[in-house]
Image: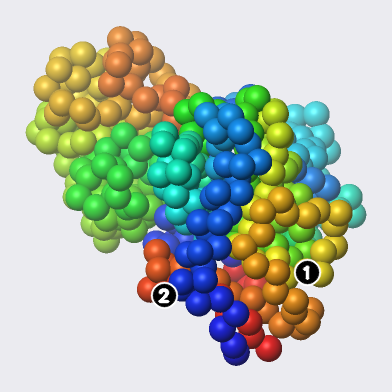
Amino acid sequence: MSSALSAPEISRALIRISHEILEANPDSSKITLLGIPTRGAHLAYRIGSHMREFAGHEIPVGTLDITLHRDDLRLRPPRAIMPTSIPNQGIEGREVVLIDDVLFSGRTIRAALDALGEIGRPRRVQLAVLVDRGHRELPIRADFVGKNIPTAITQSVKLHLTEIDSIDEVLVED
Amino acid sequence: MRHLLSIADLSKPEAISILDTAVELARVSDGAVKKLPTLRGRTIVNLFAEDSTRTRISFEAAAKRLSADVINFSAKGSSLSKGESLKDTALTLQAMGADAVIIRHSSSGAPQRLADSSWMQGSVINAGDGTHEHPSQALLDAFTIRKHLGKGSSDLQGIKVAIVGDVLHSRVARSNVLLLNLLGAKVTLVAPPTLLPVGVESWPVAVSYNFDEVVASVDVVMMLRVQQERMSDLFFPNAREYSRYFGLNSERLAIMKPNSIVMHPGPMNRGLEISADVADSARSVIVEQVANGVSVRMAILYVLLAGQPLEVGGN
Protein backbone atom coordinates (compact mmCIF):
# COMPACT_ATOMS: atom_id res chain seq x y z
CA MET A 1 0.00 0.00 0.00
CA SER A 2 1.42 3.40 -0.95
CA SER A 3 0.17 6.92 -0.58
CA ALA A 4 -0.47 8.52 -3.96
CA LEU A 5 -1.82 11.89 -2.77
CA SER A 6 -1.31 13.55 0.60
CA ALA A 7 -3.75 15.87 2.36
CA PRO A 8 -2.11 19.11 1.07
CA GLU A 9 -1.97 17.66 -2.46
CA ILE A 10 -5.68 16.80 -2.34
CA SER A 11 -6.49 20.28 -1.11
CA ARG A 12 -4.42 21.91 -3.91
CA ALA A 13 -6.02 19.67 -6.54
CA LEU A 14 -9.52 20.62 -5.37
CA ILE A 15 -8.68 24.33 -5.44
CA ARG A 16 -7.27 23.97 -8.96
CA ILE A 17 -10.35 22.04 -10.14
CA SER A 18 -12.56 24.79 -8.69
CA HIS A 19 -10.67 27.43 -10.71
CA GLU A 20 -10.80 25.28 -13.84
CA ILE A 21 -14.56 24.78 -13.59
CA LEU A 22 -15.06 28.56 -13.27
CA GLU A 23 -12.70 29.15 -16.22
CA ALA A 24 -14.55 26.70 -18.45
CA ASN A 25 -17.97 28.13 -17.53
CA PRO A 26 -17.85 31.95 -17.88
CA ASP A 27 -21.45 32.34 -16.62
CA SER A 28 -20.90 30.90 -13.16
CA SER A 29 -24.52 31.54 -12.15
CA LYS A 30 -25.54 28.62 -14.40
CA ILE A 31 -23.29 26.03 -12.71
CA THR A 32 -24.73 23.20 -10.57
CA LEU A 33 -22.41 20.69 -8.89
CA LEU A 34 -23.67 17.14 -8.32
CA GLY A 35 -21.53 14.77 -6.27
CA ILE A 36 -21.88 11.01 -6.54
CA PRO A 37 -22.21 9.48 -3.04
CA THR A 38 -20.47 8.78 -0.87
CA ARG A 39 -17.08 10.44 -1.32
CA GLY A 40 -17.91 12.27 -4.54
CA ALA A 41 -20.63 14.09 -2.62
CA HIS A 42 -18.17 15.31 0.03
CA LEU A 43 -15.77 16.45 -2.71
CA ALA A 44 -18.66 18.34 -4.37
CA TYR A 45 -19.35 20.27 -1.15
CA ARG A 46 -15.65 21.13 -0.77
CA ILE A 47 -15.34 22.29 -4.40
CA GLY A 48 -18.62 24.19 -4.01
CA SER A 49 -17.30 26.18 -1.06
CA HIS A 50 -14.04 27.01 -2.90
CA MET A 51 -16.04 28.17 -5.92
CA ARG A 52 -18.28 30.35 -3.75
CA GLU A 53 -15.15 32.05 -2.45
CA PHE A 54 -13.67 32.59 -5.94
CA ALA A 55 -16.91 33.50 -7.77
CA GLY A 56 -18.33 35.59 -4.93
CA HIS A 57 -21.72 33.93 -4.94
CA GLU A 58 -23.41 30.70 -3.85
CA ILE A 59 -22.95 27.69 -6.19
CA PRO A 60 -25.79 25.12 -5.93
CA VAL A 61 -24.45 21.74 -4.77
CA GLY A 62 -26.41 18.48 -4.65
CA THR A 63 -25.93 14.73 -4.65
CA LEU A 64 -26.93 12.16 -7.26
CA ASP A 65 -27.20 8.50 -6.29
CA ILE A 66 -26.72 6.12 -9.18
CA THR A 67 -27.31 2.75 -7.48
CA LEU A 68 -30.62 2.09 -9.24
CA HIS A 69 -29.00 2.65 -12.64
CA ARG A 70 -25.92 0.44 -12.19
CA ASP A 71 -25.37 -2.31 -14.74
CA ASP A 72 -23.74 -4.64 -12.22
CA LEU A 73 -26.63 -4.82 -9.71
CA ARG A 74 -27.21 -8.48 -10.45
CA LEU A 75 -23.60 -9.42 -9.89
CA ARG A 76 -23.37 -8.25 -6.27
CA PRO A 77 -25.37 -8.39 -3.06
CA PRO A 78 -28.01 -5.65 -2.82
CA ARG A 79 -26.54 -2.21 -2.24
CA ALA A 80 -28.02 0.45 0.02
CA ILE A 81 -29.53 3.38 -1.84
CA MET A 82 -27.89 6.69 -0.91
CA PRO A 83 -29.72 10.02 -0.78
CA THR A 84 -30.18 12.11 -3.91
CA SER A 85 -30.72 15.83 -3.36
CA ILE A 86 -31.17 18.13 -6.31
CA PRO A 87 -30.75 21.86 -5.54
CA ASN A 88 -33.88 24.01 -5.83
CA GLN A 89 -32.78 25.47 -9.17
CA GLY A 90 -33.11 21.98 -10.66
CA ILE A 91 -30.90 20.87 -13.54
CA GLU A 92 -33.04 21.97 -16.49
CA GLY A 93 -30.88 24.08 -18.84
CA ARG A 94 -27.99 24.31 -16.36
CA GLU A 95 -24.28 23.56 -16.64
CA VAL A 96 -24.08 20.41 -14.51
CA VAL A 97 -20.70 19.27 -13.25
CA LEU A 98 -20.69 15.68 -11.98
CA ILE A 99 -18.10 15.06 -9.30
CA ASP A 100 -16.70 11.65 -8.35
CA ASP A 101 -13.66 10.46 -6.44
CA VAL A 102 -11.98 7.91 -8.75
CA LEU A 103 -12.60 7.48 -12.48
CA PHE A 104 -12.00 3.83 -13.42
CA SER A 105 -14.19 1.80 -15.84
CA GLY A 106 -16.53 4.73 -16.55
CA ARG A 107 -19.60 2.66 -15.69
CA THR A 108 -20.53 4.80 -12.70
CA ILE A 109 -20.56 7.87 -14.94
CA ARG A 110 -22.71 6.12 -17.54
CA ALA A 111 -25.19 5.28 -14.77
CA ALA A 112 -25.03 8.90 -13.56
CA LEU A 113 -25.88 10.19 -17.05
CA ASP A 114 -28.91 7.86 -17.09
CA ALA A 115 -29.95 9.05 -13.63
CA LEU A 116 -29.63 12.68 -14.75
CA GLY A 117 -31.81 12.03 -17.79
CA GLU A 118 -34.62 10.99 -15.49
CA ILE A 119 -34.50 14.28 -13.60
CA GLY A 120 -34.25 16.71 -16.50
CA ARG A 121 -32.21 17.99 -19.42
CA PRO A 122 -29.11 20.00 -18.46
CA ARG A 123 -27.62 22.33 -21.10
CA ARG A 124 -24.30 20.57 -20.72
CA VAL A 125 -22.80 17.90 -18.44
CA GLN A 126 -19.14 17.95 -17.44
CA LEU A 127 -17.16 15.60 -15.22
CA ALA A 128 -14.64 16.37 -12.50
CA VAL A 129 -12.72 13.61 -10.69
CA LEU A 130 -10.01 13.69 -8.08
CA VAL A 131 -8.17 10.68 -9.49
CA ASP A 132 -8.15 9.18 -12.98
CA ARG A 133 -6.64 5.69 -12.74
CA GLY A 134 -7.25 4.58 -16.35
CA HIS A 135 -8.68 1.24 -17.55
CA ARG A 136 -11.81 2.69 -19.15
CA GLU A 137 -14.42 0.20 -20.37
CA LEU A 138 -16.65 2.86 -21.95
CA PRO A 139 -15.93 5.93 -24.12
CA ILE A 140 -15.97 8.40 -21.22
CA ARG A 141 -13.39 11.00 -20.17
CA ALA A 142 -13.17 13.59 -17.43
CA ASP A 143 -13.12 17.36 -18.11
CA PHE A 144 -11.32 18.16 -14.86
CA VAL A 145 -8.82 15.78 -13.25
CA GLY A 146 -7.05 16.20 -9.91
CA LYS A 147 -4.32 13.71 -10.70
CA ASN A 148 -3.72 10.97 -13.26
CA ILE A 149 -2.42 7.90 -11.43
CA PRO A 150 -1.34 5.04 -13.71
CA THR A 151 -2.30 1.74 -12.07
CA ALA A 152 -2.35 -1.95 -12.81
CA ILE A 153 -5.86 -3.37 -13.22
CA THR A 154 -5.28 -5.60 -10.18
CA GLN A 155 -4.53 -2.66 -7.89
CA SER A 156 -7.21 -0.71 -6.06
CA VAL A 157 -7.33 3.04 -5.43
CA LYS A 158 -8.88 4.26 -2.15
CA LEU A 159 -9.75 7.83 -1.23
CA HIS A 160 -10.05 8.70 2.45
CA LEU A 161 -11.68 11.99 3.47
CA THR A 162 -11.79 13.61 6.89
CA GLU A 163 -15.62 13.77 6.73
CA ILE A 164 -15.72 9.95 6.94
CA ASP A 165 -12.28 8.51 7.60
CA SER A 166 -10.60 11.15 9.81
CA ILE A 167 -7.77 11.71 7.27
CA ASP A 168 -7.38 13.07 3.72
CA GLU A 169 -5.35 10.71 1.52
CA VAL A 170 -5.37 8.66 -1.66
CA LEU A 171 -3.92 5.14 -1.35
CA VAL A 172 -2.95 2.65 -4.03
CA GLU A 173 -3.20 -0.93 -2.80
CA ASP A 174 -1.86 -4.05 -4.46
CA MET B 1 -32.73 -12.01 2.47
CA ARG B 2 -34.38 -14.11 -0.22
CA HIS B 3 -38.05 -14.30 0.80
CA LEU B 4 -40.39 -12.03 2.73
CA LEU B 5 -42.75 -14.39 4.54
CA SER B 6 -43.13 -12.95 8.01
CA ILE B 7 -42.05 -9.90 9.97
CA ALA B 8 -40.67 -12.37 12.52
CA ASP B 9 -37.87 -13.18 10.03
CA LEU B 10 -36.70 -9.55 9.92
CA SER B 11 -34.04 -8.03 12.14
CA LYS B 12 -34.36 -4.41 13.22
CA PRO B 13 -31.59 -3.19 10.85
CA GLU B 14 -33.20 -5.07 7.94
CA ALA B 15 -36.58 -3.49 8.65
CA ILE B 16 -35.05 -0.02 8.93
CA SER B 17 -33.08 -0.51 5.73
CA ILE B 18 -36.31 -1.35 3.85
CA LEU B 19 -37.93 1.83 5.23
CA ASP B 20 -34.87 3.95 4.32
CA THR B 21 -34.78 2.48 0.82
CA ALA B 22 -38.49 3.32 0.48
CA VAL B 23 -37.77 6.97 1.37
CA GLU B 24 -35.37 7.24 -1.56
CA LEU B 25 -37.67 5.32 -3.89
CA ALA B 26 -40.59 7.60 -2.99
CA ARG B 27 -38.78 10.30 -4.96
CA VAL B 28 -39.32 8.24 -8.10
CA SER B 29 -43.06 8.24 -7.52
CA ASP B 30 -42.90 12.05 -7.19
CA GLY B 31 -40.67 12.56 -10.23
CA ALA B 32 -41.60 13.34 -13.83
CA VAL B 33 -40.42 9.94 -15.10
CA LYS B 34 -41.93 7.29 -12.80
CA LYS B 35 -39.66 4.51 -14.00
CA LEU B 36 -36.28 3.05 -13.11
CA PRO B 37 -34.39 0.39 -15.09
CA THR B 38 -33.37 -1.50 -11.94
CA LEU B 39 -35.32 -4.78 -12.41
CA ARG B 40 -35.31 -4.85 -16.20
CA GLY B 41 -35.69 -8.40 -17.48
CA ARG B 42 -37.04 -9.83 -14.21
CA THR B 43 -40.41 -11.53 -14.19
CA ILE B 44 -42.69 -11.10 -11.20
CA VAL B 45 -45.90 -13.06 -10.80
CA ASN B 46 -48.82 -11.73 -8.79
CA LEU B 47 -50.50 -14.93 -7.58
CA PHE B 48 -53.70 -13.83 -5.88
CA ALA B 49 -55.82 -16.74 -4.71
CA GLU B 50 -57.93 -14.33 -2.66
CA ASP B 51 -59.51 -11.00 -3.58
CA SER B 52 -57.47 -7.83 -3.26
CA THR B 53 -57.52 -4.34 -4.71
CA ARG B 54 -54.84 -2.29 -2.98
CA THR B 55 -52.16 -4.90 -2.43
CA ARG B 56 -52.26 -6.34 -5.93
CA ILE B 57 -52.36 -2.98 -7.72
CA SER B 58 -49.72 -1.59 -5.42
CA PHE B 59 -47.31 -4.50 -6.01
CA GLU B 60 -48.02 -4.26 -9.73
CA ALA B 61 -47.28 -0.51 -9.80
CA ALA B 62 -44.13 -1.06 -7.72
CA ALA B 63 -42.83 -3.78 -10.05
CA LYS B 64 -43.60 -1.72 -13.15
CA ARG B 65 -41.85 1.37 -11.77
CA LEU B 66 -38.75 -0.79 -11.42
CA SER B 67 -39.19 -2.05 -15.02
CA ALA B 68 -39.95 -5.68 -14.10
CA ASP B 69 -42.38 -7.69 -16.21
CA VAL B 70 -45.55 -8.46 -14.27
CA ILE B 71 -47.87 -11.39 -14.80
CA ASN B 72 -51.17 -11.19 -12.95
CA PHE B 73 -52.77 -14.38 -11.89
CA SER B 74 -55.95 -14.44 -9.86
CA ALA B 75 -58.02 -17.35 -8.65
CA LYS B 76 -61.04 -16.31 -10.63
CA GLY B 77 -60.38 -16.92 -14.30
CA SER B 78 -57.48 -19.34 -13.76
CA SER B 79 -57.15 -23.06 -13.19
CA LEU B 80 -57.05 -22.40 -9.43
CA SER B 81 -60.83 -22.13 -9.61
CA LYS B 82 -60.87 -25.57 -11.29
CA GLY B 83 -59.16 -26.99 -8.20
CA GLU B 84 -55.52 -26.97 -9.35
CA SER B 85 -53.20 -27.49 -6.40
CA LEU B 86 -50.68 -24.92 -5.18
CA LYS B 87 -47.91 -27.32 -6.20
CA ASP B 88 -49.03 -27.59 -9.81
CA THR B 89 -49.51 -23.84 -10.02
CA ALA B 90 -46.00 -23.31 -8.64
CA LEU B 91 -44.50 -25.78 -11.11
CA THR B 92 -46.19 -23.89 -13.93
CA LEU B 93 -44.77 -20.59 -12.69
CA GLN B 94 -41.29 -22.13 -12.42
CA ALA B 95 -41.56 -23.37 -16.00
CA MET B 96 -42.37 -19.83 -17.08
CA GLY B 97 -39.24 -18.54 -15.36
CA ALA B 98 -40.72 -16.39 -12.60
CA ASP B 99 -38.02 -14.59 -10.56
CA ALA B 100 -40.46 -13.81 -7.77
CA VAL B 101 -43.96 -14.76 -6.74
CA ILE B 102 -46.13 -12.41 -4.75
CA ILE B 103 -48.72 -14.64 -3.16
CA ARG B 104 -51.98 -14.01 -1.36
CA HIS B 105 -53.79 -17.07 -0.13
CA SER B 106 -56.67 -17.81 2.21
CA SER B 107 -54.63 -20.54 3.96
CA SER B 108 -52.16 -19.41 6.60
CA GLY B 109 -48.73 -20.74 5.73
CA ALA B 110 -49.22 -21.10 1.96
CA PRO B 111 -46.31 -18.72 1.18
CA GLN B 112 -44.09 -20.62 3.63
CA ARG B 113 -44.98 -23.89 1.90
CA LEU B 114 -44.06 -22.36 -1.46
CA ALA B 115 -40.74 -21.03 -0.15
CA ASP B 116 -39.72 -24.25 1.62
CA SER B 117 -40.60 -26.53 -1.27
CA SER B 118 -38.39 -27.25 -4.24
CA TRP B 119 -41.30 -26.45 -6.59
CA MET B 120 -39.83 -23.15 -7.63
CA GLN B 121 -36.53 -21.27 -7.34
CA GLY B 122 -37.65 -17.63 -7.15
CA SER B 123 -38.28 -15.35 -4.21
CA VAL B 124 -41.61 -15.63 -2.41
CA ILE B 125 -43.30 -12.52 -1.04
CA ASN B 126 -46.22 -12.95 1.32
CA ALA B 127 -49.03 -10.56 0.37
CA GLY B 128 -51.36 -11.87 3.06
CA ASP B 129 -51.94 -15.48 4.10
CA GLY B 130 -55.14 -16.41 5.89
CA THR B 131 -55.14 -14.97 9.39
CA HIS B 132 -51.35 -15.24 9.72
CA GLU B 133 -49.38 -12.27 8.36
CA HIS B 134 -49.32 -9.39 5.90
CA PRO B 135 -45.73 -8.11 6.16
CA SER B 136 -45.77 -5.51 3.36
CA GLN B 137 -48.79 -3.82 4.98
CA ALA B 138 -46.98 -3.60 8.33
CA LEU B 139 -43.92 -2.10 6.61
CA LEU B 140 -45.98 0.56 4.86
CA ASP B 141 -47.80 1.34 8.10
CA ALA B 142 -44.48 1.75 9.92
CA PHE B 143 -43.24 3.93 7.04
CA THR B 144 -46.33 6.14 7.32
CA ILE B 145 -46.04 6.43 11.11
CA ARG B 146 -42.32 7.23 10.91
CA LYS B 147 -42.96 9.91 8.29
CA HIS B 148 -45.59 11.66 10.43
CA LEU B 149 -44.34 11.11 13.97
CA GLY B 150 -40.77 9.82 13.68
CA LYS B 151 -39.20 13.30 14.15
CA GLY B 152 -36.25 12.24 12.00
CA SER B 153 -35.35 9.14 14.00
CA SER B 154 -34.88 5.85 12.18
CA ASP B 155 -37.15 3.75 14.42
CA LEU B 156 -40.46 4.30 16.28
CA GLN B 157 -39.10 4.43 19.84
CA GLY B 158 -41.76 5.52 22.34
CA ILE B 159 -44.62 6.07 19.86
CA LYS B 160 -47.93 4.77 21.23
CA VAL B 161 -50.17 2.86 18.86
CA ALA B 162 -53.68 1.49 19.46
CA ILE B 163 -54.80 -1.30 17.13
CA VAL B 164 -58.58 -1.46 17.38
CA GLY B 165 -61.12 -4.02 16.28
CA ASP B 166 -61.12 -7.47 14.76
CA VAL B 167 -57.66 -8.63 15.90
CA LEU B 168 -58.74 -12.27 15.81
CA HIS B 169 -59.07 -12.45 12.03
CA SER B 170 -56.47 -9.81 11.22
CA ARG B 171 -53.16 -10.71 9.59
CA VAL B 172 -52.48 -6.95 9.43
CA ALA B 173 -52.64 -6.79 13.24
CA ARG B 174 -50.25 -9.75 13.66
CA SER B 175 -47.63 -8.28 11.33
CA ASN B 176 -48.05 -4.81 12.80
CA VAL B 177 -47.67 -5.99 16.40
CA LEU B 178 -44.39 -7.72 15.49
CA LEU B 179 -42.96 -4.83 13.47
CA LEU B 180 -44.07 -1.99 15.77
CA ASN B 181 -42.62 -3.88 18.70
CA LEU B 182 -39.36 -4.50 16.79
CA LEU B 183 -39.09 -0.77 16.07
CA GLY B 184 -39.71 0.24 19.69
CA ALA B 185 -43.34 1.43 19.57
CA LYS B 186 -45.79 0.64 22.39
CA VAL B 187 -48.85 -1.22 21.15
CA THR B 188 -52.24 -1.51 22.82
CA LEU B 189 -54.86 -3.84 21.34
CA VAL B 190 -58.45 -2.71 21.82
CA ALA B 191 -61.22 -5.20 21.03
CA PRO B 192 -64.10 -7.09 22.57
CA PRO B 193 -62.82 -10.31 24.23
CA THR B 194 -64.50 -12.38 21.51
CA LEU B 195 -62.35 -10.76 18.81
CA LEU B 196 -59.00 -11.32 20.56
CA PRO B 197 -57.05 -14.47 19.69
CA VAL B 198 -56.28 -17.20 22.20
CA GLY B 199 -52.82 -16.61 23.69
CA VAL B 200 -52.87 -12.83 23.20
CA GLU B 201 -51.43 -12.45 26.71
CA SER B 202 -48.12 -13.81 25.37
CA TRP B 203 -47.93 -11.06 22.70
CA PRO B 204 -45.70 -8.04 23.43
CA VAL B 205 -48.73 -5.74 23.81
CA ALA B 206 -51.16 -4.26 26.32
CA VAL B 207 -54.82 -5.23 25.95
CA SER B 208 -57.87 -3.11 26.70
CA TYR B 209 -61.59 -3.67 26.29
CA ASN B 210 -62.36 0.03 26.65
CA PHE B 211 -61.65 2.20 23.62
CA ASP B 212 -62.51 5.47 25.43
CA GLU B 213 -59.77 4.89 28.02
CA VAL B 214 -57.13 4.41 25.31
CA VAL B 215 -58.08 6.81 22.54
CA ALA B 216 -56.95 10.02 24.27
CA SER B 217 -53.46 8.81 25.13
CA VAL B 218 -52.10 7.33 21.88
CA ASP B 219 -50.27 8.86 18.90
CA VAL B 220 -51.73 6.49 16.33
CA VAL B 221 -55.16 4.88 16.14
CA MET B 222 -55.10 2.00 13.69
CA MET B 223 -58.58 0.71 12.92
CA LEU B 224 -59.07 -2.83 11.62
CA ARG B 225 -61.78 -3.99 9.28
CA VAL B 226 -64.48 -6.21 10.75
CA GLN B 227 -63.95 -9.27 8.56
CA GLN B 228 -67.48 -10.50 8.16
CA GLU B 229 -66.45 -12.97 5.42
CA ARG B 230 -64.26 -14.87 7.91
CA MET B 231 -66.82 -14.84 10.71
CA SER B 232 -68.63 -18.11 11.18
CA ASP B 233 -69.87 -17.36 14.70
CA LEU B 234 -71.58 -14.44 16.36
CA PHE B 235 -68.75 -12.33 17.79
CA PHE B 236 -70.79 -9.29 18.88
CA PRO B 237 -74.52 -8.74 19.37
CA ASN B 238 -75.07 -6.36 16.45
CA ALA B 239 -73.32 -3.83 14.25
CA ARG B 240 -74.75 -0.80 16.07
CA GLU B 241 -73.46 -1.98 19.42
CA TYR B 242 -70.02 -2.77 17.98
CA SER B 243 -69.90 0.63 16.35
CA ARG B 244 -70.83 2.39 19.61
CA TYR B 245 -68.15 0.65 21.71
CA PHE B 246 -65.34 0.06 19.23
CA GLY B 247 -65.97 2.37 16.27
CA LEU B 248 -63.97 5.54 15.68
CA ASN B 249 -66.44 8.42 15.39
CA SER B 250 -66.11 12.20 15.56
CA GLU B 251 -66.63 12.28 19.38
CA ARG B 252 -63.64 9.97 19.91
CA LEU B 253 -61.64 11.84 17.24
CA ALA B 254 -62.20 15.08 19.20
CA ILE B 255 -60.43 13.75 22.31
CA MET B 256 -57.42 12.33 20.46
CA LYS B 257 -54.01 13.94 21.04
CA PRO B 258 -53.03 16.84 18.80
CA ASN B 259 -50.88 15.60 15.86
CA SER B 260 -52.12 12.05 16.33
CA ILE B 261 -53.13 10.17 13.19
CA VAL B 262 -55.87 7.74 12.12
CA MET B 263 -54.96 4.72 10.00
CA HIS B 264 -56.89 1.91 8.34
CA PRO B 265 -55.45 -0.81 6.11
CA GLY B 266 -58.58 -0.82 3.94
CA PRO B 267 -61.06 -1.77 2.70
CA MET B 268 -63.16 0.23 5.18
CA ASN B 269 -66.64 -0.58 6.41
CA ARG B 270 -67.74 3.05 6.66
CA GLY B 271 -70.24 3.40 9.47
CA LEU B 272 -69.13 0.20 11.24
CA GLU B 273 -65.54 0.44 12.57
CA ILE B 274 -64.98 3.99 11.29
CA SER B 275 -67.45 6.75 10.56
CA ALA B 276 -67.35 8.48 7.19
CA ASP B 277 -66.47 11.92 8.56
CA VAL B 278 -63.47 10.47 10.47
CA ALA B 279 -62.26 8.54 7.42
CA ASP B 280 -62.30 11.76 5.39
CA SER B 281 -60.95 14.03 8.17
CA ALA B 282 -57.60 15.83 8.14
CA ARG B 283 -56.27 13.40 10.78
CA SER B 284 -56.82 10.43 8.49
CA VAL B 285 -53.77 9.23 6.55
CA ILE B 286 -55.66 6.34 4.95
CA VAL B 287 -55.20 7.50 1.35
CA GLU B 288 -51.56 8.33 2.01
CA GLN B 289 -51.04 4.76 3.27
CA VAL B 290 -51.94 3.54 -0.21
CA ALA B 291 -49.45 5.92 -1.87
CA ASN B 292 -46.72 4.90 0.59
CA GLY B 293 -47.57 1.27 -0.16
CA VAL B 294 -46.10 1.59 -3.65
CA SER B 295 -42.79 3.04 -2.39
CA VAL B 296 -42.46 0.42 0.36
CA ARG B 297 -43.25 -2.43 -2.04
CA MET B 298 -40.65 -1.06 -4.49
CA ALA B 299 -38.16 -1.20 -1.62
CA ILE B 300 -39.14 -4.81 -0.84
CA LEU B 301 -38.70 -5.84 -4.49
CA TYR B 302 -35.40 -3.94 -4.67
CA VAL B 303 -33.98 -5.60 -1.55
CA LEU B 304 -35.09 -9.10 -2.59
CA LEU B 305 -34.42 -8.99 -6.32
CA ALA B 306 -31.92 -6.33 -7.32
CA GLY B 307 -28.74 -8.02 -6.19
CA GLN B 308 -27.18 -11.42 -6.22
CA PRO B 309 -28.23 -13.17 -2.99
CA LEU B 310 -25.33 -13.51 -0.56
CA GLU B 311 -25.94 -17.20 0.02
CA VAL B 312 -28.02 -19.36 -2.23
CA GLY B 313 -30.87 -21.08 -0.43
CA GLY B 314 -30.64 -19.00 2.75
CA ASN B 315 -33.39 -16.71 3.87
Q: Which residue is mark 1?
A: A134
**Local secondary structure at mark 1:** loop
Left or right: where does residue A66 sit relative to residue B95?
left
Please state the horizontal and vertical placement of residue A76, each as a whole percent of the image. Answer: 70, 67
Q: Amino acid at mark 2?
A: Ile
Residue A96 visible here: yes
Residue B96 left/right relative to A10: right
- Across and down, in percent, residue B304 comes to 63, 57
Image coords of residue B77 (percent x, y): 80, 29
Q: Amino acid at mark 1?
A: Gly
Q: Chain of mark 2?
A: A
Q: Nearer the viewer, residue B21 or B143?
A: B21
Quadrant of residue B163 within the rendered picture:
top left
Q: Vertical placement of A14 versus B102: above or below? A: below
In which quadrant is the N terminus of chain A drawn? bottom right
Q: Is residue B255 left or right of residue B287?
A: left
- Name the residue located 17 percent from the left edge and 37 percent from the top edge: B218
Give the residue at mark 2: A167
**Subunit bearing disc 1:** A
